[in-house]
Amino acid sequence: MLRRLIMLLALALAPLAGGPALAHQQKIAITTVSANPRTGMIEVIHQVPVHDAEHALTMQGVRLPDIVGSAKSREDFASYVTTRFLLDVDGKPVSLAYVGAEISGGSLMVYQEAPAPKGEATLRVNSQILTDVWVRQENRVNIGSGTKVTTFIFTAGDAAREAPLTR
Amino acid sequence: MRFVLFVAALLFAIPAHAQGIQQTKGNYEDKFRQLDEVLPTPNTYRNASGAPGHEYWQQKVDYNITATLDEPRRRITAKATIRYTNNSPDSLPWLWMQLDQNIFRNDSMAEMTDAFGGPGRRGPKVSLGSANEPTKLSMDELRRQQAMADNSYGYDINAVKTLAGADLPHTIVGTLMRIDLPQPLAPGESTEFTIDWAFNIVEEDAVVARSGYEHFPDDPRKGGNDIFLLAQWFPRMVAYSDYEGWHNKEFLGRGEFTLEFGDYTVEMTVPNDHIVASTGVLQNPETVLTAAQRQRLEAAKDADAPMFIVTPEEAAAAERGNPSGSKTWKFAAQNVRDFAWASSRKFMWDAQGHKQPGAKHETVMAMSFWPKEGGDLWRKYSTAAVVHTMKVYSRFSFDYPYPTAQSVNGPVGGMEYPMITFNGPRTTLNKDGTRTYSLAEKVFLVGVVIHEVGHIYFPMTVNSDERQWTWMDEGLNSFLDSVAGYEWDPDMPWTRSLPRDMVSYMVSSQQEPIMTQSDSVTNLGANAYGKPSAALHLLRDTVIGRERFDFAFREYARRWKFKRPTPADFFRTMEEASGTDLDWFWRGWFYTTDHVDISLDSIYRLRIDTEDPDIDLPRRRAERADEPEVVGIGLNEQQRLPIWVMENPGVTDFYDKNDEFTVTPKDRKSYTSFLEGLDPWERKVFDRAVKEDANYYVLNFSNKGGLVMPIILGLTFKDGKTEKMTIPAEIWRRNSRDVAKLLVFPKGKELVQVVVDPDWETADADIENNHYPRRIIPSRIEAFKSERSKARVSRDLMGEAAGAEPDGRK
């Protein structure tokens, strides 16, 4: 399914369904991008509500819960997430390594990382996770660790935004 | 509109200090300032303790509706007689109605203000181009555009007349309609009028709404079948209240509704092979149900488990067949604020009587209606979840207030109405004809049924205004649904909305206070569902305590049952009934975007000086001995540099045998005169302190997040014992940035480690500065790498275990 999804995204007319009116669905993904001085890596953590993730895929025309139901399903959904998140460091695209994914509470956590540059760096990010599924999807990206973060909110089609990587 | 102005005034007023209180020197910030200047002035309609005032009033609207569903044309034609009772002290020259179907008109405000590529409305995606991506219209947006172009949506208001048949002048303004009365409606009087209307039902999957039809093209019947969910399907009276007058705010799709309570009788004529689920109680079962179905319904009242009223076999037969005519179902509902229904020949139906001894409705019929696509997921869990919801929610509020509680499966993911809810989760059809589902889908079904049935309490009975304050029902309901979820199965991965889950949202630099008008909020889920839910969990389990919180929460529900509360009524009731000043809590969590981050910066250990030179001076000497040696002296030794005193051992004096801590008679005399100089009470206190020789610690905290919170301390002592201590938030009242706290422990009880908020109760955003001494907190990714935990809840393990292969259809 993932392959099909990516293929269709390449078309100008992407046959992706709008989600139904869900009184309790969040349609939010929160991503945190921060530098870890211990490991020397930029760590990227995506938090997507499980309901949203599974239901979104269910609603993508195919209506198959097995999109996350096959043996590799969660990993496949996680790698879909990684294709919808773009990161440039100092103007150069960074390919984030996929670390893994796990369920925490009602959320699917997806982990990625890449080596952090030494010294000052400017990040350019764009989070389009599930914006191809729901018009109401609003993605929040916090850049920075702990409580000193810069937040950007992305909706479908928004351009990338820039912020310094604080340590 | 008034609310918008109020919020604007609030946001702009704080920096300008327009309310007359100004801190003009220094940087003192009063996190405990009373909310008096923010909350509306109490009056005779709603009093200062948060209860309805002695002159509280609300309007009453009764509807008598006859409606016909034209299945082939997917059109409703209806007529209503509406009786409006003016209980307000005001004369009303006109009445306002909500025409919610008009949101689907091509020229509606919702359509016209839908920002392309923005999150404007519920519906399929469009995307604005960016540097790397072309502007896109999805297939579904095209489908929506085509549906909007091909069909004429919105109400056809065919007549508005007096009972005598005279036309009433009326003006349609978007989703609102003003009806001018022949003469003003005086306080205490009623007026009746009739409306004839019709509308084309939207296809839910194409247009995306809170109701509509869903088509099943693969059904065995030629042309397939539909499920019809009818909500916002009749012109509804706009609320008129003491604090807002007419609640005239255009329906933009997100901010839901508030309405007036009243009695309904509704007759719906549908194809005679349909089953209808509806708000209210069926009045003519003998006409619309078979004798067997009536008998089953009767038996279900005392059943221990859900019983089929319409069996899967009966539903399967109906799904294949065709109607031979029509049937009229008649329902009546008392004291409800809205009315919704569903109709389809696909429905199977089960029911179970839920007993509430001593309640107005001692037997509540918990019922579910679903097509075969719902499968075992629905058979096992839907009605069971309805019953569970009533058991848990009634403990926190009041007996379930209506005779029925229903869950209906259809195209809407989750939506609530009095006595009836629409819930979306379904099973997956496999190629071998079996139906399976993932654990996530199961959690989703149980969770959404609890949530939507929970809405029958809030806001269907406690009638808050979701168009303005989404959190008042969604936040309270998310809190209660997580409580009910844990009481269903604590091990299921609920969307739990505990404080610890909200940290990444609460530290965001872009967010709005919870007290923001619902159409303006970004991330409504986090803002109006998650954050208030987290706040209430925190109030219940940490700040107030369960007993007093539950008492106060129940009091709020009881006071405002079948009435119309505002945020101030909730805030005031919770304070008054729990006996806790919570203005600081509401101010921080609901009126600001602060987050929680309390840092334990340092701990100093103090010891009482005995003043006795024979005790204190040896202590000093020991302290000095514990200090590290001066580095240069050590290096001198390593270099074997000659030291003068070593080379001249014969030259000594008093100071070679006595150090600076040597006790002299002068010291002892001074000690004696110190003791003699003490008053008897001082002597007593001093002697005891010296004898006890307790451990004194000064803990220095700083508030880095802004939100003031109780300081919860996990204390570890040298002997390995641990203790938990909670310092109330009021410690921050004089200085909300830095505070110090003295802790005293008996001799021998030596503190070795302190952790702030050890159980992650307060949404403290930075764990690292909670530990003293500091320690390395692995990042989530580091922790994940070390654990490599693997979640399996999203997989259709049931299907995998059976080796099933998913089919491509519903």
Image (cartoon, coloured by chain):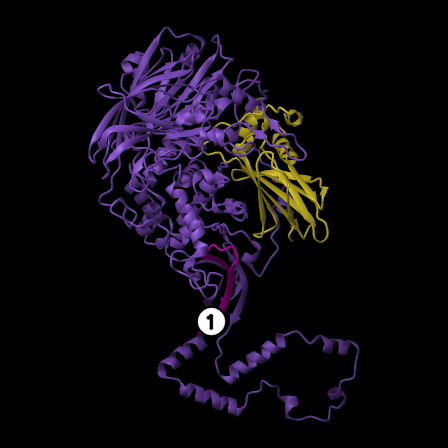
- Residue B423, quarter of picture: top left
Please check the rendered image and state whether residue B704 is part of the magenta-colored stretch, yes or no: yes
The residue that mark 1 highlights is B694
Which residue sits at x=48%, y=76%?
Answer: B608
- What secondary structure is marked by label 1? loop
Which residue sits at x=50%, y=50%?
Answer: B763
* In the image: residue B219, left or right of residue B655: left
Q: Position of residue B740 (x, y in %)?
A: 48, 66
What colour is chain A?
Answer: yellow
Mark 1 is surrounded, within 10 Å at the Cα level, by few (under 14), some (14 to 19) or many (20 or more) other residues, namely some
Residue in front for this viewpoint, B634 or B70 = B70
Question: In the rendered view, would you say B717 is above or below B295?
Answer: below
User: Which chain is mark 1 on?
Assistant: B
- Residue B2, quarter of picture: top left
Question: In the rendered view, would you say B248 is above or below B169?
Answer: below
Q: Position of residue B105 (x, y in %)?
A: 45, 24
Q: Position of residue B182 (x, y in %)?
A: 23, 27
Callout 1 amino acid: Ala
Q: Does residue B442 show up?
A: no
* In the image: residue B107, left or right of residue B274: right
* In the image: residue A101, left or right of residue B470: right
Q: Which residues are drawn in magenta?
A: B692-716
Residue reaching furthest to the top: B324
Please check the rendered image and state whether residue B65 is part of the magenta-colored stretch, yes or no: no
Give the tally of numbered discs. 1
- Chain letter tied to purple: B
Residue in front for this viewpoint, B166 or A94 = B166
Magenta: main secondary structure: strand
Residue in front for this viewpoint, B239 or B668 = B239
